[in-house]
Amino acid sequence: MSKRRPIIGGNWKMNTNAESAVALARGVADGCAGLSGVEVFVCPPFPYLTHVGSALNNAVMLAAQDLYHEPDGAFTGEISTAMLADCGVRAVLTGHSERRHVIGEGDALINKKTRAALNAGLLAVLCVGEKLDQRDAGETDAVNERQIRAGLAGVTPDQMARVVIAYEPVWAIGTGKTATPADAQDAHAKIRAVLTDLYGPEIAGATRIQYGGSVKASNAAELFGQPDIDGGLIGGASLKTADFLDIVRAAAG
Ligand code: PGA
């Protein structure tokens, strides 16, 4: 049994509206009340952060899908860490594959965002993962290693207590295809080895590594049962209260 507390995140992406976001948040908060042994966060779209925050309880953390690393100024359309904190946000995703591959963010920007989140006292969920062609070329571990090393450059050992890694193979996101538990475990173990090289065995052993990519109630327990998988980052299945709660319960054990 791992001593790490599993963590489950719901990434709502560009879905919901004010009403459905609040209803989803209420359902998740009710279902998580009293559950121990698992940490839960949800990432609503920016405009609904405060609505959702007021519908949550202590059992569920409010998180954001993105941030900008500058504190303020002429950055049209961007959102600072102080603005997020003002809305009650305590955690934020960085480097999600849709930010990397749809919006075009590179490792250097993702590193700035990760450090800004940590410097602001937020929990940073750094997402990494290979594309299908990279997997087919046998580059999975090299891609993860590069994204981890670049994403965490300048992150101090103390700050690692507020870092979660989300391993999300890009070909598994929103496709219904999931890495086999054995393949996912293998990638997670390699990621932990990179963390050991960077920060030593104690910090690496304490860092949570979530799996993401078409996690659903039917495959969650087997994935979360792997020794180096510490919960999941959930997209599609996080939009349905019952499905998300089944996944949370699978992690709570
Ligand atoms: P999915 O998304 O669960 O819909 O595959 C996961 C994610 O993008 O975090």
Image (cartoon, rainbow, N blue to C red):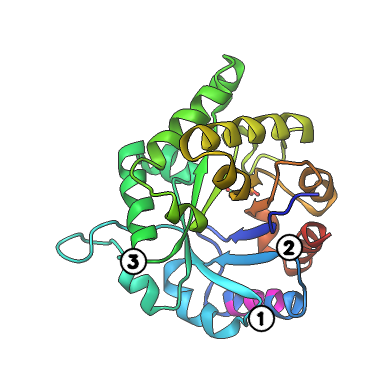
- Disc 1 beta carbon < 8 A from ligand 1? no
C-alpha distance separating marks 3 and 2: 27 Å
Determine crowd level at label 2: few under 14, some 14-19, many 20+ residues with C-alpha closer than 10 A.
many
Residue at left offset 32%, top offset 73%: 83
| Residue mark closest to the camera, 1 vs 3 | 3
- Disc 2 designates what residue? 244
Determine crowd level at label 1: few under 14, some 14-19, many 20+ residues with C-alpha closer than 10 A.
some
- Disc 3 designates what residue? 81
Residue 23 is a magenta residue: yes
Q: Earlier in the sequence, mark 1 or mark 2?
A: 1
Q: Residue 199: image x %, image y %?
A: 48, 40
Give the secondary structure at mark 3: helix
State the mark number for residue 26: 1
Residue situated furthest top in the rendering: 137
Tell me which amino acid carries mark 2: Phe
Q: Main secondary structure of the magenta part?
A: helix
Give the secondary structure at mark 2: helix
Horizontal relation, residue 227 to residue 26: left or right:
right
Give the secondary structure at mark 1: helix
Residue at left offset 61%, top offset 50%: 206
Q: Earlier in the sequence, mark 1 or mark 3?
A: 1
| Residue mark closest to the camera, 3 vs 2 | 3
Residue 153 can be seen in this image:
yes
**Count of marks, rendered view:** 3
Q: Residue 118: image x %, image y %?
A: 39, 59
Magenta part of the protein: which range? 22-28
When the figure is inspected, residue 189 is found, relative to residue 250, above or below; the finding is above
Horizontal relation, residue 130 to residue 150: left or right:
right
Residue 67 can be seen in this image:
no
Residue situated furthest bottom in the rendering: 54
